[in-house]
Amino acid sequence: MKIMDLDFDKMGGLIPAIVQDANTNKVLMLGYMNREALEMTNKTGKVTFYSRTKKRLWTKGEESGNFLHVVDILVDCDKDTLLIKAKPVGPVCHTGSDTCWDEKNEEDIMFLKYLQDFICTRYKEMPEGSYTTSLFKKGVNRMAQKVGEEAVETVIEATNGTDDRLIYEASDLIYHLIVLLTSKGYRIEDLARELKSRHKE
């Protein structure tokens, strides 16, 4: 992205910058940037706006510590609006809300990514007393066996059990599957990519 290609003149030297959570895709806030703000954002990796009230550059989080760490910056087709994908540190709105529209910036499905990261950390650090560590130490055969056991228990609950137990056993299955994948150098996102490649509308 070349700053000089952007149309800052349309709004008197400013362009709207929509900030979106890079993980959840929730729209977090809207701000405005001039050339200097965009240059600062690119340089520091933290979203910096031009404050129309303060008449100066303003890095989001400079007072609260709730920075927006840039993942990607996209330009729209008219080259007069930015979409900034970022990872927020804490709530984004000055009211304490996750977003400036008072929405919760969370989706339960994203916990699987957190769990994957947690299990990867366990694999690297191997802390004593951890059940996950004990699985890694027992080797791939035992991990694969656990996946099989949990799959059987999930089937049993689906056919002859209760809904609560089905969810419980299916959760155990997913956890042990992530452990097995991690030991083989893969992540649950690799399954998502495979399923996505198979999907047809």
Image (tube, rainbow, N blue to C red):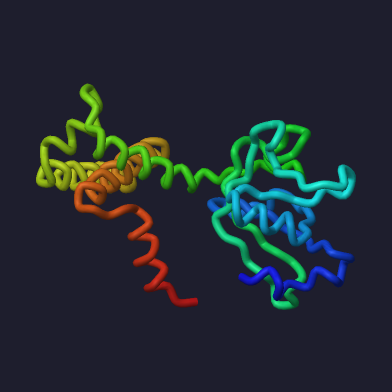
Residue 156 visible in image: no
Query: Is residue 93 left or right of 11 when viewed as pictured?
Result: left
Q: Position of residue 80 (x, y in %)?
A: 77, 70
The quadrant in which residue 200 appears is bottom left
Above or below: residue 190 compared with residue 201: above
Q: Position of residue 98 (x, y in %)?
A: 68, 39
* Left or right of 15 in this view: 145: left
| Numbered disc total | 0
Along the line of sight, the residue nearer the viewer: 22 or 73: 73
For the point 25% across and 38% down, the residue is: 124
Q: Residue at x 31, y 48 (%)?
A: 159
Q: Quadrant of residue 76?
A: bottom right
x%, y% of residue 103?
A: 70, 43
| Residue 165 placement, left or right of 71 | left
Q: For the N terminus, which image quadrant? A: bottom right
* Res. 160 visible in picture: yes
**Vertical placement of residue 72 versus 114, above or below:** below
Outermost residue, top side: 129
Residue drawn at point x = 82 percent, y = 47 percent: 56
Image point 57% across, 47% down: which residue?
87
For the residue pair 22 and 176, the one nearer the viewer reads as 22
Estimate the x, y position of residue 54 in percent, counting from the top left.
87, 43
The image shows residue 1, relative to residue 60, as above or below, that is: below
Indicate left or right for 96 with 165 as reference. Answer: right
